[in-house]
Image (cartoon, rainbow, N blue to C red):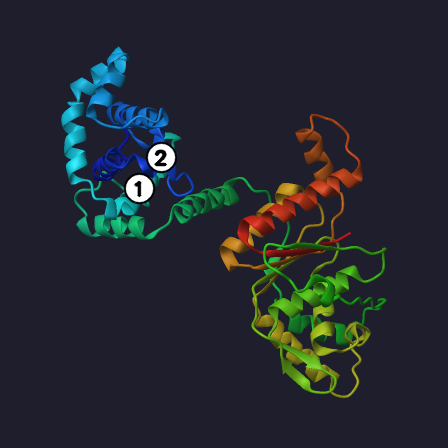
Amino acid sequence: MKSKYEDLAAVAQVIGCVFNNSSLLDDTDKYVISEQDFADDFHRIIFGSIYNIYLTGSQVNIDAIVDYLENRPKFNAIFKQGKGVEYILEASQIAQQSTFNYYYTRLKKFSLLRAYDNFGLDVSFLYDPNNILDTKKKQQQEDWLDNTSLVEIARTIDTKIDEIKSQYVDEDLGTGYQAGDGIDELIADLEKHPEVGIPLYGSYINTVTRGARLRKFYIRSGATGMGKTRAMIADTCNFACNKIYHDQFGWINNGTSQPTLFIATEQDKGEVQTMMLAFLSNVNEEHILNGLYEEGERDRVIEAAKIIKNSPLWIEELPDFSLDDVENKIKKHIREHDVRYVCFDYLQTSLKILEEISKKSGGVKLREDNILFMLSARLKDLANQYGIFIMSGT
């Protein structure tokens, strides 16, 4: 069945321009045209003839095309039935080299929509060629198609697929919440019911890494108990919060707030929040956990809580996760909150990862370092694919 996603004007312009100037096919870095860009056999045969004659180094003209098809009876019959000679001559006359880029891009856009449609995906919500009554909607979709790149069209469709997958397929991977959710109650509760813990802290050597660069994935390694999580939370707050307390200058501006996601693998909500409060307010976390403050400290902690609540800072808890779980959570926050910076507490094996890898490897047992490498590679791919910064630890 003939596809409804076809722009005959674009087809005629592309065929006419290539027929008039076959050197366009030399610029493969800019133009990539194949028979799949044409919806029906008639146009495929014409373009295929032009392309194959061009490959031989011969001059492309009507006689060459007719001679080429004489030895191909099946194709020649379709060519003659569609009055191929007349079609090529007419396309040659109306073709305008000055508008070739526009019609080439439009041809490729229809090829993309047609590929999705042929696969069974309904893309009429973006462009509905059957709509002939709603002229306003028709014009809006035409304008959208003209002003949207191929990459953005594919991304829009893939986002819709991801949303459906997230709604019906993704498992319940844990609890997500805004970083400031219930933080006031936490502070008050800790004053009444102090929690004793050992403070851990670590520094991040910015000079070595040259900052948190987008499309980069950093891993910070250290022994257990060296403060990897605290350092990760400090970086998380540094990305997302626009104020921080300084011993000498008080509250100072900390640049613009960047949408940030922290993925916790062992800490619960309260543990993450108290570490964030301690970092931003420069108050010893032990004082916050005990609910006993020195002069001025409680006010700083309350101010830090306000900053966190107003920051584009999000937390996900994934105590037991697979490679797909981590990827789906990151993609969800990119989609819903435009997250640019991701801090994943640290790389470790879990029951779900071991089960997932076992299935994908056909039961072959892999060493732990190989499994962690696969998780690292997935995170690096996500950083590149979505143009975000990801940091983790081992």
- Residue 271: image quadrant is bottom right
According to the picture, the residue beneath numbered tag 1 turns out to be 104
Return the residue nearer the eye: 163 or 130: 130
Residue at position x 64%, y 44% in the image? 378
| Mark nearer the N terminus (2 vs 1) | 2
Amino acid on which the number 2 mark rests in the picture = Ile
The part of the image, by quadrant, that contains residue 389 is: bottom right
Q: Is residue 33 left or right of residue 347?
A: left
Do tag 2 and tag 1 residues touch (Cβ < 8 Å)? yes
Residue at image coords 30%, 43%: 106
Mark 2 neighbour class, 10 Å CA radius: few under 14, some 14 to 19, many 20 or more: some
Q: How many marks?
A: 2
Distance between the alpha carbons at the discs numbered 2 and 1: 9 Å
Q: Amino acid at mark 1?
A: Tyr
Task: Check disc 2 and report its element: helix, strand or loop.
Answer: loop
Give the x, y percent position of residue 376: 69, 46
Name the residue rendered at 82%, 73% in the picture.
Answer: 286
Task: Check the image and report above or below for 64 versus 215.
Answer: above
Give 192 or 19, whichever is nearer the viewer: 19
Residue 249: give x, y in percent of width and height. Answer: 69, 87
Label 1 neighbourhood size at 10 Å, few (<14), some (14-19), many (20+)? many
In this figure, which residue is indicated by the disc labeled 2?
33
The image shows residue 330, relative to residue 256, as above or below, that is above
